[in-house]
Image (cartoon, rainbow, N blue to C red):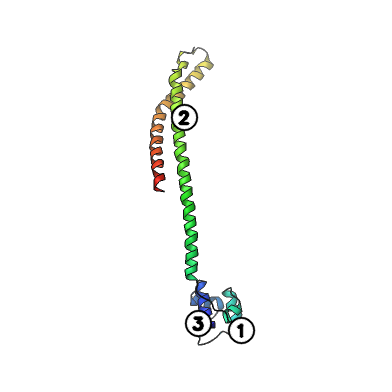
Amino acid sequence: MLNENIKAIRKSKGLSQQELAVRLNIVRQTVSKWEQGRSVPDSDLLISLSEVLETPVSTLLGETVTETEADTLKAISEKLEVINLQLAQRKTRGRKIIHWSLISLCAVIVIVFAILFELESSYLGWNYSDPETAVLGVAFHSLEWLFVRVAPITLIGAVIGIFLTGNGNRDL
């Protein structure tokens, strides 16, 4: 019984005979003899063995220990399944945020274009003899010029992004 318990607990802890022997400051063959039932550890080694294996001496001596590798694998599998589900939910949430952000960006671009179209660049008719008015007019003109050139590219990219993030939701 002792030999079976030593072997089962050692394996459940993921230790090889060599690793256990090193931790106990003995040779591997001694551990092998214990597990084969050809010898038993003395009282000092039995206490050291229980400490290394983090198992009570009573368990080593009397209680039957079964290998729980299948149970351990099942528990790990269940935890991984939960983690995968959480990651999938986070990915879906992130996609939705990106999707709606891109839709909002498109709406803002269209609204700004409508405003610029409605105003018809009214600053071009200002009297530029006043220096402050001239600076303000140049600033408006620069912003409008930059917006008119960058916004269409941004709009096209946002529309493509909307389609890509929208189609990706069906796959998840």
Residue 129 versus residue 68 in the image, above or below: above
Q: Which residue is mark 1?
A: 43
Per the rendering, the mark at residue 164 is none
Q: Position of residue 40 (x, y in %)?
A: 55, 85
Residue 83 versus residue 12 in the image, above or below: above
At label 1, counting other C-alpha atoms closer than 10 Å, the crowd grade (few under 14, some 14-19, many 20 or more) is few
Q: Position of residue 171 (x, y in %)?
A: 39, 47
Alpha carbon of mark 1 to alpha carbon of mark 3: how far?
Answer: 16 Å
At label 3, counting other C-alpha atoms closer than 10 Å, the crowd grade (few under 14, some 14-19, many 20 or more) is many
* Residue 5 horizontal side relative to residue 149, left or right: right
At label 2, counting other C-alpha atoms closer than 10 Å, the crowd grade (few under 14, some 14-19, many 20 or more) is few
**Front in this rendered view, residue 130 or 71:** 71
The answer to the question of whether label 2 and label 1 lie on touching residues, with beta carbons closer than 8 A, is: no
For image coordinates 48% across by 48% down, the residue present is 90
Residue type, mark 2 in image = Val
Q: Secondary structure at mark 3?
A: helix
Q: Which residue is mark 2?
A: 108
In terms of image quadrants, where is residue 150?
A: top left
For image coordinates 54% across by 81% down, the residue present is 26
Residue type, mark 1 in image = Ser
